[in-house]
Amino acid sequence: MHAALVTSFDRPPQYTEVPDPEPGPDEVLVHVLAAGLHPRVRSGAAGTHYTSDGALPLVPGFDGVGRTEDGRRVFFAGLHAPRGSMAELVAVPAGRLVELPPGLDDVTIAAAMNPAMSAWLALRHRAALQPGESVLVLGATGNAGRLAVQLARHLGARRIVGAGRDATSLEVVRRLGADAIVPLTADDVAERLAREAADVDVVVDYVWGAPTEQALAAVTGARSDPAHLLRWVHVGATAGPTITLPAATLRKTNVQVSGSGQGSVSPEGMVGAITELATLLPQVRPAVDVVAVPLREVAAAWEARTASGTRVVLVP
């Protein structure tokens, strides 16, 4: 079969011929129909994701849409290097297959399911968002951030604040359901966050780094009731892998910081989220712009620049 193959962390994957996978016990052979090029996939192929063991070669890809030998159209996730989804065939543990209902095409599901899963797990499972609560989405202009806004609204959020770096994309976020938007590049970003998000119940954070330090100080410093619980869920680190968190912040406000991702969420939890989203996404109509690219053009697709909110999907 053909697959994308990473042989160096300094070069994009190359389209090449590799042996067909041999399914082990409790595994199912899946013919891949579409696989998303997510940030999680890029970091895994670069050896920088926290789950990477540094071993090469590897086939990148964390999830995808496929068809089993018996004709079922399925979504699968949770693949580990060296066996990723950017290939014509993949062997998947049977427990990680979710049969897909009609409603969305293969490419749209491959583009939307991963960012939707990150948002759904953060909102519903890690933060346990309740109807009538309010949410701040840090990094709302990317695919996952946009879907976090849409899914928060679906879950009954009373007020949603979207914050991001791209002013044009923030207007899209407003149209998707955000009640207020905050440009993270504004000179008065701290004042805006304090004004718009002082009393939110949940923060879904895709940025981390310096913007999170600034947002955390602004939000916790402006709360009308410091004892009211603030659930801050870290999902991504587009602005940096670390923050400096003053000890006083944890004492003067009732803030709970947690993470959402591989490890903090079990494989069973991910499959459960995919099962829920398989039915939900056709109703939500995910706001994801998709570019479908043949798998044989993976090297060029890897290095191409794409607009914010656009997701590349590889099609064997």
Image (cartoon, rainbow, N blue to C red):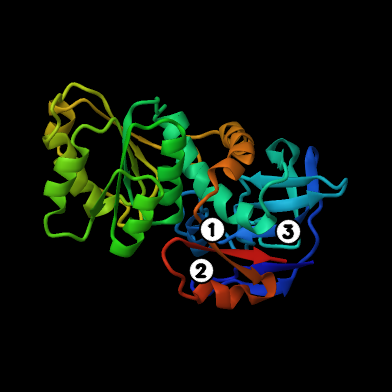
Rendered location of residue 223, percent (x, y)? 15, 31
Q: Residue at x 61, y 57 (%)?
A: 61
Q: CA distance from mark 3 to mark 2?
A: 26 Å
Q: Nearer the viewer, mark 3 or mark 2?
A: 3
Is label 3 or label 1 in front? 3
What numbered label is drawn on residue 41? 1
Q: Position of residue 242 (x, y in %)?
A: 28, 50
Please report contact status of discs 3 and 2: CB closer than 8 Å, yes or no: no
Answer yes or no: do the residues labelled 3 and 1 have beta carbons within 8 Å?
no
Residue at the image point whose x is 79% and y is 64% from the top = 19
> Does residue 201 appear to the left or right of 215 in the view shown?
right
Q: What kind of element bears circle 1?
A: helix
Residue 260 in view, yes or no = no
The residue that label 2 is drawn on is 9
Q: Label 1: how many residues lie within 10 Å, few (<14), some (14-19) or many (20+)?
A: many
Residue 193 image offset from top left, x and y in percent: 18, 45
* Residue at image coords 15%, 41%: 195
Q: Residue at x 51, y 68 (%)?
A: 9
User: The N terminus is located in which quarter?
Assistant: bottom right
**Residue holding disc 3:** 33
